[in-house]
């Protein structure tokens, strides 16, 4: 009687493991197939980007950038040594995949500030990307990403 019981338990465990693997596989494939983030290239991002309140980002071919009228929401109030709501900075940029992205698609612009209005440098941050009406938008979340508030930059 022990032998049939062991076989039943082994069959149930095997079936459960296969079900978990199948569900994980479906979610993985769905994420890849429904991922609507752009796969960025240098040619797509080089140029002038504008956002609200006069925020301007210039990404150059030599992988350097200049950014002006940077809202404190980009730098984060916890890192702000001054009370200015805007800053000016420059440094180097690169394209990167988001952390833990199984597709390794280049969907973010990484900014490494070498100079930044009174802020400690080097300072780095990432801009995410999405499709917009007229092409691609670069953005960061303002506060909690779950609230969906974004500051968008559009290429001009």
Image (tube, rainbow, N blue to C red):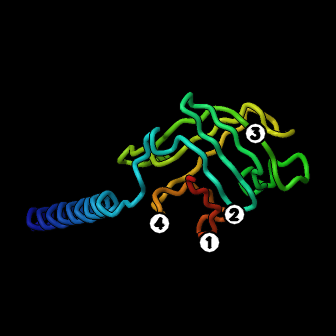
4 or 2: mark nearer the eye: 4
Mark 4 or mark 1: name the one nearer the start of the chain: 4
- CA gap between label 4 and label 2 equals 24 Å
- CA gap between label 2 and label 1 equals 8 Å
Marks 2/1 in contact by CB < 8 Å: the verdict is yes
Mark 3 or mark 4: name the one nearer the start of the chain: 3
Disc 3 packing (10 Å; few <14; some 14–19; many ≥20): many
Residue of label 3 = 89
Q: Given the current orientation, which residue lies at the most extreme right position?
A: 83
Marks 3/4 in contact by CB < 8 Å: the verdict is no
3 or 1: mark nearer the eye: 3
Q: Number of callouts in the render?
A: 4
Q: Which disc is residue 143 wearing?
A: 2
Name the foreground residue: 8 vs 137: 137
Q: Is residue 155 left or right of residue 50?
A: left
Residue of label 4 = 133
Residue of label 1 = 147
Disc 4 packing (10 Å; few <14; some 14–19; many ≥20): few
- CA gap between label 4 and label 1 equals 22 Å
Secondary structure state at the residue bearing disc 1: helix
Q: Is residue 96 left or right of residue 74?
A: left
Q: Is residue 135 above or below residue 43?
A: below
Marks 4/1 in contact by CB < 8 Å: the verdict is no
């Amino acid at each position: 009687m022990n032998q049939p019981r062991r076989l039943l338990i082994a069959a149930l465990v095997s079936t459960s493991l296969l079900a978990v693997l199948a569900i994980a596989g479906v979610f993985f494939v769905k994420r890849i197939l429904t991922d609507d983030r752009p796969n960025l290239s240098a040619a797509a991002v080089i140029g002038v980007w504008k956002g609200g309140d006069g925020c301007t980002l210039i990404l150059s071919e030599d992988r350097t950038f200049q950014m002006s009228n940077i809202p404190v929401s980009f730098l984060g109030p916890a890192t702000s040594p001054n009370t200015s709501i805007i800053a000016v900075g420059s440094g180097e940029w690169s394209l990167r995949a988001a952390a833990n992205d199984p597709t390794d698609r280049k969907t973010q612009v990484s900014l490494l500030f070498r100079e930044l209005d009174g802020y400690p440098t080097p300072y780095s941050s990432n801009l995410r990307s999405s499709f917009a009406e007229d092409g691609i938008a670069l953005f960061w979340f303002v506060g909690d990403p779950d609230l969906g508030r974004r500051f968008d930059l559009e290429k001009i």
